[in-house]
Each structure stands twice: as structure tokens, then as C-alpha cells.
Image (tube, rainbow, N blue to C red):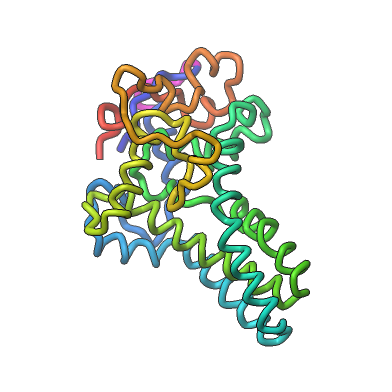
């Protein structure tokens, strides 16, 4: 079935165009999932089931278990281990903020041919269809090295190989927590906790009002520090690029690689162009 209505790039139209879009998008779907998962039509129970079946989450948890196992083989003293874990938890929101703001929302990656596919996969697709679970999670070949680089060197400097393993495991587990809350923010579910509800409201504003702020997922401290945090939604100031991150049909004429991979440039609100 067609996934989205788009402005075609080049001569591919009609049935051939729809077929190609379907084939490209279905290629990223885990084979054991019998259907697409749209969070705006899922219950909390359905999310729990799908979440722990997703390959990326399985990969994070498996790598964390291996890192913890290796820690017991190459242990570090208690104090350096505790410090490495604490620093990893503290630095994670800052790393996420920087990556989200200056990499995922960059307007330079789609201009580079060999980076266009990566940018499309890691964030452009998510803003095009915010509630589709299959493209909400990051790809392991990009996330695992990033988590390792953000945590393991810090742990190593604090307490050697053992503390590096503890820091890396902390980053992996923290990623799982972040990803689950990210799912909750897109889920058709009203949180019972006020802080979760406010967190969800900020993220929904990021996706449906103005993508140039509220870069945090569970922590908006760095948004407040760097003045990218906002609560009040002014309808007259809604971003025109909230769904395409600045990759407009006009931009695609000059930098066509993402459009070629996507079968076109989708425009308009997701609810108006993506039948679930």
C-alpha cells in the first residue's frame, strides 16, 4: 500500500512510484513484525510488546549485558565505577542535545551525497512521519559507535577498562530509557504523571509547531541553558519547515539525493498525506 503522498522528483509517477516507495520503506521493517506500528493508534500494552521485540532495543540490551559481563571479568574499584556511571548519566543529555540540534537537524548533511542517506534515516524520515515506530529508533550502526564514544573514553579516564565498560553499559541502558519515553511522547496515551505529560507536550511542540527548539527528550535543562526551550505555542509563528527540516522541494532541486531515496519530497501535515 502507498505510504505517503509526495511531490515526485523526476518522471516516476503513478503505480510505479507508489510501488517503489513501498518497497524502500518495507525494507527497514523487521521481518517478524506482521504490520506497521503507528504509535498514534497503539495502546501502552501494545507499545511494551513491540518495544522489546524491536532489533535496536534487543541490540542495546544485549550489548549492555555483554559490557556488564566483561566488567566482572575486568572490574574497576567501586568509587571510580560509581563516578563513571554518574558522569555518563549527566553527560548523556548534553550529548543528545548537541547531536539533535547540530547533527540531526543540520542543513549540511543532505548537501553531501554520501551523508544524505544517513541523514534521511536518522531523522528526516522521523519528522516526515513522527508516529511511525519503525523509523523512530536510530539505526545501530550509527547509535552504537556514538554511545561508545560519548561514554567509554570518560569511563576509561576515570577508572580504566572496567569503568569504561560500566560507562558504556550505562549509556546503552540510558538510551533504552530515552527511546521508551520517546515512544510514550508519540503514543496515543495520556500520561498520569504531570512531569511526563509536560515532557510529552514539549516534544509534541518540537514535532508539530517549531522544530528549532525543545531538543531534549527527557531533559530540557540544556534547552533552557542555550535558550531553545519554549512552552507557549504561538500559532502565528509556526515553523514552515517543522515536517521537512528545511529540505523543501526547492532545496531538493539543488540537492536531490534525499528526494531520490524518498521517491519525492513529502509536503503538508502527516495526517493529511499518510493513510494508516
Task: Report the residue at 51% width, 25% height from top.
Answer: 259
What is the x, y in percent for residue 34? Answer: 32, 57
Task: Report the residue at 70% width, 76% height from top.
Answer: 80
Q: Of 122 and 204, which appears nearest the observer?
A: 204
What is the x, y in percent for residue 79? Answer: 67, 80
Q: Quadrant of the C terminus?
A: top left
Task: Report the residue at 31% width, 51% height from top.
Answer: 37
Find the magenta span and give its range: 10-16
Q: Residue furthest bottom?
A: 73
- The quarter of the displayed image where residue 65 is located: bottom right
**In the picture provided, is 248 more to the left or to the right than 146?**
left
Instruction: Reply above or below: 249 against 96.
Output: above
- The quarter of the displayed image where residue 98 is located: top right
Task: Report the residue at 31% width, 17% height from top.
Answer: 236
- The quarter of the displayed image where residue 63 is located: bottom right
Q: Quadrant of the N terminus?
A: top left
Instruction: Reply above or below: 178 against 59.
Output: above
Instruction: Reply above or below: 195 against 107.
Output: below
Amino acid at each position: 500500500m502507498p505510504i505517503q503522498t509526495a511531490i515526485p522528483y523526476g518522471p516516476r509517477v503513478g503505480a510505479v512510484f507508489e510501488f517503489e516507495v513501498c518497497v524502500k520503506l518495507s525494507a527497514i521493517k523487521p521481518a517478524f513484525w506482521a504490520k506497521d506500528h503507528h504509535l498514534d493508534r497503539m495502546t501502552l500494552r501494545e507499545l511494551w510488546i513491540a518495544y522489546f521485540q524491536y532489533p535496536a532495543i534487543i541490540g542495546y540490551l544485549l550489548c549492555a549485558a555483554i559490557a556488564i559481563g566483561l566488567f566482572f571479568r575486568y572490574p574497576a574499584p567501586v568509587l571510580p565505577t560509581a563516578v563513571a556511571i554518574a558522569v555518563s548519566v549527566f553527560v548523556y543529555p548534553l550529548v543528545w542535545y548537541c547531536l539533535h540540534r547540530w547533527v540531526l537537524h543540520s542543513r549540511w548533511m543532505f548537501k553531501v551525497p554520501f551523508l544524505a542517506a544517513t541523514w534521511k534515516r536518522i531523522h528526516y524520515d522521523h519528522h516526515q512521519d513522527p508516529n511511525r515506530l519503525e523509523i523512530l529508533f536510530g539505526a545501530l550502526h550509527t547509535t552504537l559507535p556514538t554511545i561508545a564514544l560519548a561514554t567509554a573514553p570518560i569511563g576509561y579516564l576515570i577508572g580504566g577498562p572496567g569503568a569504561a565498560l560500566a560507562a558504556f553499559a550505562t549509556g546503552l541502558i540510558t538510551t533504552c530509557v530515552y527511546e521508551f519515553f520517546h515512544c510514550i511522547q508519540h503514543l496515543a496515551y495520556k500520561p498520569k504523571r504531570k512531569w511526563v505529560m509536560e515532557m510529552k507536550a514539549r516534544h509534541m511542540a518540537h514535532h508539530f509547531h517549531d522544530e528549532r527548539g525543545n531538543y531534549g527528550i527527557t531533559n530540557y535543562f540544556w534547552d533552557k541553558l542555550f535558550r531553545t526551550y519554549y512552552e507557549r505555542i504561538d500559532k502565528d509563528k509556526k515553523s514552515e519547515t517543522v515536517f521537512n527540516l528545511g529540505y523543501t522541494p526547492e532545496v531538493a532541486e539543488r540537492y536531490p539525493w534525499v528526494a531520490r531515496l524518498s521517491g519525492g519530497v513529502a509536503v503538508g501535515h502527516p495526517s493529511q498525506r499518510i493513510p494508516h
